């Protein structure tokens, strides 16, 4: 059962430390620097939703460096391998 309509069950939200009555957007749950310099990000997002990770060197101009669709409730993506 989901109370807030964000696609996660109340139990999944409680286990992730989220509030089950508040809609939750995409969240980074973990990051790790891997051997070779790439970065692994774990995200919690809504199943089937598409997202883009943006980067900027001046906080004015932004570029999408990774686009992905959440296919499971806790997806992992590695940066550095996609560049």
Image: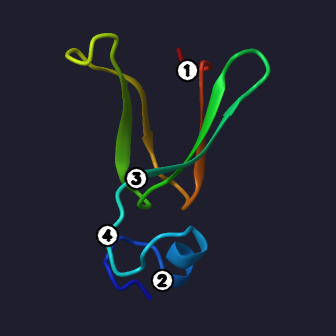
Instruction: Measure the alpha-carbon separation of dots 3 and 1.
Output: 20 Å
Crowd band around label 2 with a 10 angstrom C-alpha radius: few (<14), some (14–19), many (20+) = some
Instruction: Measure the alpha-carbon separation of dots 2 and 1.
Output: 34 Å
Q: Residue at x 54, y 62 (%)?
A: 73
Give x and y (percent) for residue 52. Answer: 36, 35
Above or below, 77 against 21 in this view is above
Question: The residue tagged with tag 1: helix, strand or loop?
Answer: loop
Question: The residue tagged with tag 3: helix, strand or loop?
Answer: loop
Residue 1 in which image quadrant: bottom left
Instruction: Measure the alpha-carbon separation of dots 4 and 2.
Output: 11 Å
Which callout, 2 or 1, points at the residue further toward the start of the chain? Answer: 2
Q: Which residue is mark 3?
A: 26
Question: The residue tagged with tag 4: helix, strand or loop?
Answer: loop
Give x and y (percent) for residue 63. Answer: 31, 18
Above or below, 36 against 45 in this view is above
Instruction: Measure the alpha-carbon separation of dots 3 and 4.
Output: 10 Å
Q: Which residue is mark 4?
A: 23
Which callout, 4 or 1, points at the residue further toward the start of the chain? Answer: 4
Q: Residue at x 36, y 53 (%)?
A: 49
Give x and y (percent) for residue 5. Answer: 31, 77
Question: The residue tagged with tag 2: helix, strand or loop?
Answer: helix
Which callout, 4 or 2, points at the residue further toward the start of the chain? Answer: 2
Q: Which residue is mark 1?
A: 82
Crowd band around label 4 with a 10 angstrom C-alpha radius: few (<14), some (14–19), many (20+) = some
Q: Which residue is mark 2?
A: 10
């Amino acid at each position: 059962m989901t109370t807030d309509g964000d696609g996660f069950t109340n139990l999944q939200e409680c286990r992730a430390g989220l509030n089950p009555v508040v809609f939750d957007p995409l969240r980074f749950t973990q990051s790790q620097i891997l051997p070779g310099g790439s970065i692994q990000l774990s995200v919690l997002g809504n199943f089937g939703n598409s997202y883009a990770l943006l980067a900027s060197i001046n906080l004015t101009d932004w570029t999408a460096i990774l686009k992905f669709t959440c296919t499971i409730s806790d997806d992992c993506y590695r940066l550095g391998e996609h560049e």
